[in-house]
């Protein structure tokens, strides 16, 4: 086998990035846009040390789990990877991958689990979309997701996974930008004004927030255009400008200015009201997140006497509902703006048995002397630093709830916490927060065996 050659293979697995896995003469080959059970002809594009990368040339026999993609740019857009896989089978794969990763990396066996949680729909579920802006060769404004492994925009007028109420804005705002003559930021020359279009919607309230990420706060006519948008879209409650002049691929800058309307939208979550700003972290699948919180509340069976510590608490998404069933809750979050919003959301809902502290979990947790009954962990994809895990082993809460969006780092961290037998893994609940992609959320429950 060499670069450019054609090989016939059967797809027998999917890797963590969602690509199909096949073998030819003992060599592992990764092929995107495939499904377990596909028999394909693939062209070898790249030969690596431990694997090869290929591209479908022909589907010889389709998998029984292969479906017709419900997105017209599914073969081009890098936003989703699994439009060709049956929805139910997607969830089955994710459940299997979580459990197998915990076994393989964590060394766990006989894991108690239940069927994967899903939201109300596998399409139209995203409550937030942030699109890069660009220009075609003839000067037309474009927005959409990047092509796979590139920074070329696939121009979109609608997206099947975003909330359908956002689609009219996606199609029409490009025309307004064009008419205003606002320039588009060029990543190579670092010239131009507009970088991204960010849209956010409250799934329960239907309120919409529109944000332009720009290198220049002086957009000619922006106030007039913002008023036009507010009049045109009945659900639009605010138009903001986020200022990001840095030569970086980070989307949001540090400063956001309200041009018209409100600087936030209102959302109802778990019976509470939250204010969500343009750069607020909030789970993109509201319904699935509520279902996961329901499992956490059910498993914890709080009686009102517990003290809860919520590390990586964000704006208090889980902290506040848990505080309603506990004696006290404390939240830690690195971003000061998120802590300010968490305090605002607590006040908004009349919840006064909760405290929030700004700082890194790595710094604050080892300094805590108080005793907590339950610690909630919801770290970024890289998982927890050892200083956090060591602090937990020292604090010895009776229960640890670990929410994760990366099964491999979850398995690694759980292994560390359980390696000396002080904690045991009691239950794992996977949740499909991101249909049409290989990403999966899950929550693991640990109980203290001995102090």
Image: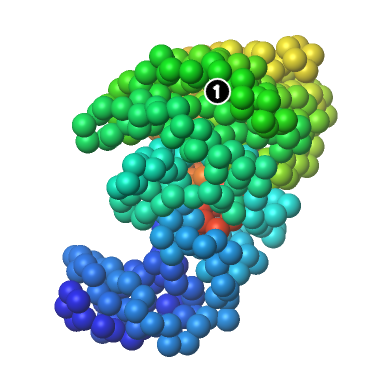
What residue is shown at x 25% (from left), y 74% (from top)?
44
Above or below, 76 against 351 in this view is below
Q: Where, quadrant-wise, is the N terminus in this rendering?
A: bottom left
407 and 284: which is toward the camera? 284
201 and 18: which is toward the camera? 201
Furthest residue in direction left, as rendered = 2
Residue 51 placement (x, y as % from top left):
26, 68
Q: Is residue 60 visible?
A: yes
* Label 1 Cα crowd, 10 Å radius (few <14 / some 14-19 / many 20+): some
Above or below, 260 against 184 in this view is above
For the image, the number of numbered tags is 1
Q: Is residue 309 visible?
A: no
Left or right relative to 137: residue 100: right
What residue is shown at x 40% (from left), y 27% (from top)?
182
Left or right relative to 172: residue 55: left
Residue 397 placement (x, y as % from top left):
61, 29
Q: Where, quadrant-wise, is the C terminus in this rendering?
A: top right
Residue 204, by quadrant, is top right
Residue 370, by quadrant, is top right
């Amino acid at each position: 086998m060499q670069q450019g050659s054609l090989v016939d293979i059967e797809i027998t697995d999917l890797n963590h990035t969602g690509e199909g896995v096949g073998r030819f003469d003992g060599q592992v080959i990764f092929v995107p846009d495939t499904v377990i059970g596909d028999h394909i002809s693939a062209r070898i594009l790249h030969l690596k040390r431990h694997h090869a990368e290929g591209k479908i040339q022909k589907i010889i026999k389709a998998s029984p789990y292969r479906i017709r993609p419900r997105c017209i740019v599914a073969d081009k857009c890098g936003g989703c990877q699994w439009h060709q896989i049956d929805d139910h089978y997607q969830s089955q794969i994710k459940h299997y991958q979580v459990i197998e990763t915990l076994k393989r990396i964590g060394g766990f066996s006989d894991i108690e689990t239940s069927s994967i949680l899903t939201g109300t729909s596998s399409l139209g579920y995203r409550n937030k979309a942030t699109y890069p802006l660009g220009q075609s060769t003839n000067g037309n404004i474009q927005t959409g997701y990047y092509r796979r492994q590139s920074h070329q925009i696939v121009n979109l007028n609608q997206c099947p996974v975003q909330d359908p109420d956002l689609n009219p804005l996606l199609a029409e705002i490009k025309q307004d930008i064009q008419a205003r003559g606002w320039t588009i930021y060029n990543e190579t020359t670092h010239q131009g004004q507009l970088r991204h279009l960010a849209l956010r919607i409250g799934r329960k309230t239907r309120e919409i927030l529109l944000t332009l990420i720009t290198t220049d706060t002086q957009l000619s006519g922006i106030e007039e255009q913002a008023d036009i948008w507010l009049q045109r879209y009945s659900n639009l409650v605010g138009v903001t400008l986020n200022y990001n002049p840095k030569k970086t691929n980070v989307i949001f800058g540090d400063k956001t200015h309200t041009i018209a309307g409100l600087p936030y939208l209102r959302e109802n979550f778990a019976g509470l009201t939250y204010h969500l700003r343009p750069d607020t972290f909030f789970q993109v699948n509201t319904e699935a997140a509520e279902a996961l919180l329901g499992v956490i509340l059910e498993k914890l069976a709080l009686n009102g006497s517990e003290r809860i510590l919520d590390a990586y608490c964000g704006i208090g998404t889980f902290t506040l509902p848990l505080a309603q069933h506990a004696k006290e809750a404390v939240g830690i979050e690195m971003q000061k703006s998120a802590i300010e919003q968490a305090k605002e959301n607590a006040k908004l809902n009349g919840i006064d048995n909760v405290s929030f502290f700004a700082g890194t979990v790595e710094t604050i947790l080892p300094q805590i002397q108080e005793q907590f009954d339950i610690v909630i962990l919801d770290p970024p994809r890289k998982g927890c630093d050892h200083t956090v895990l060591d602090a937990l082993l020292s604090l010895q809460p009776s229960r640890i709830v670990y929410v994760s969006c990366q099964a491999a780092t979850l398995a690694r961290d759980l292994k560390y916490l359980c390696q000396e037998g002080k904690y045991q893994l009691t239950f794992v609940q996977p949740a499909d927060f991101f249909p049409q992609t290989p990403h999966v959320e899950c929550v693991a429950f640990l109980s203290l065996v001995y102090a």
